[in-house]
Amino acid sequence: MRLDVVTIFPEYLEPLNVSLVGKARARGQLDVNVHDLREWTYDRHNTVDDTPYGGGPGMVMKTDPWGAALDDVLAEGYEDGAHGPVLVVPTPSGRPFTQELAVELSERPWLVFTPARYEGIDRRVMDEYATRMPVYEVSIGDYVLAGGEAAVLVVTEAVARLLPGVLGNAESHRDDSFAPGAMANLLEGPIYTKPPQWRGHGIPDVLLSGHHGKIARWRRDEALRRTTRNRPDLIERCDPGAFDKKDREMLSILGWRPGPDGRFGRDPEAVEE
Ligand code: 6GU
């Protein structure tokens, strides 16, 4: 997979040399190219922003540097269709970046990122490139960052670990929390390693029992416990067919009941476990 990032802070992308993404680059599985947007400015001050039409606070990134930069980057191998590039535009007004979208992007050969500073990029830039390629405006969560560079790191890491051969062990991503198409998206419960005692804290006996069935059941119960507590929306959204008899017993203990449509919701009478 090829990645291009156009930014006014190329040094912000240095983490792409580290860890999983860095190793994938070293192995030739990822071809990462970071470009300084100011190389496509032609005035004395290397201007990339200007005041917004209609007034208002902040500055807007100008069309021309982006147009010139993207034309040059895309000229390095543009193709139409599934083999062509996609534009990924990080913005707090984008669609939520999810595991499903990470999987979709991981199936493309070429991602071009345009992280912005200031209030964002002149709309006409996205409109122009949308005539040539898919444009994904994505947000990584409900908070506001000072710029899109951190979001590029987030998206790149989520996508890179899905590429064939990038994760060390060839275990599948099917069991990832949030794997698309999973029966139920539950958060993972707690995990432990040696030593068996640490500062007076032991580990649950079942994990030492060697009883694989019991261990699997305990893990599932802990996943339900953690998901009801931290992400009740995931339980409410679940197809009730995803819950077996034991799941239902656990959900009941946690104070969750099926509603008229079968979907689970928190029993308003229940006391928090
Ligand atoms: Cl992608 N960019 C910025 N600036 N803020 C964000 C974001 C992106 N996602 C959430 N907040």
Image: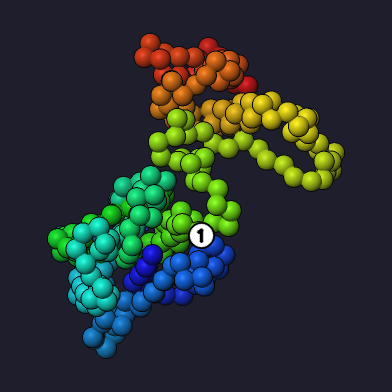
Left or right of 37? Residue 231 is: right
Image height of 74 relative to 201, above or below: below
Mark 1 secondary-structure assignment: loop
Image height of 240 relative to 32, above or below: above
Q: Quadrant of the C terminus?
A: top right
Place residue 180 in its image quadrant.
top left
Label 1 CB less than 8 angstroms from ligand 1: no
**Residue 122 at what x, y percent from top left?**
21, 64
Q: Amino acid at mark 1?
A: Val
Left or right of 207? Residue 81 is: left
Q: Is residue 142 visible?
A: no
Q: Is residue 262 visible?
A: yes
Seen at 46% across and 53% down, the residue is 162
Q: Nearer the viewer, residue 12 or 191?
A: 191
**Residue 54 at what x, y percent from top left?**
15, 60
Seen at 40% across and 15% down, the residue is 262
Residue that carries the numbered disc 1 in the rendered image:
166
Image height of 89 relative to 202, above or below: below
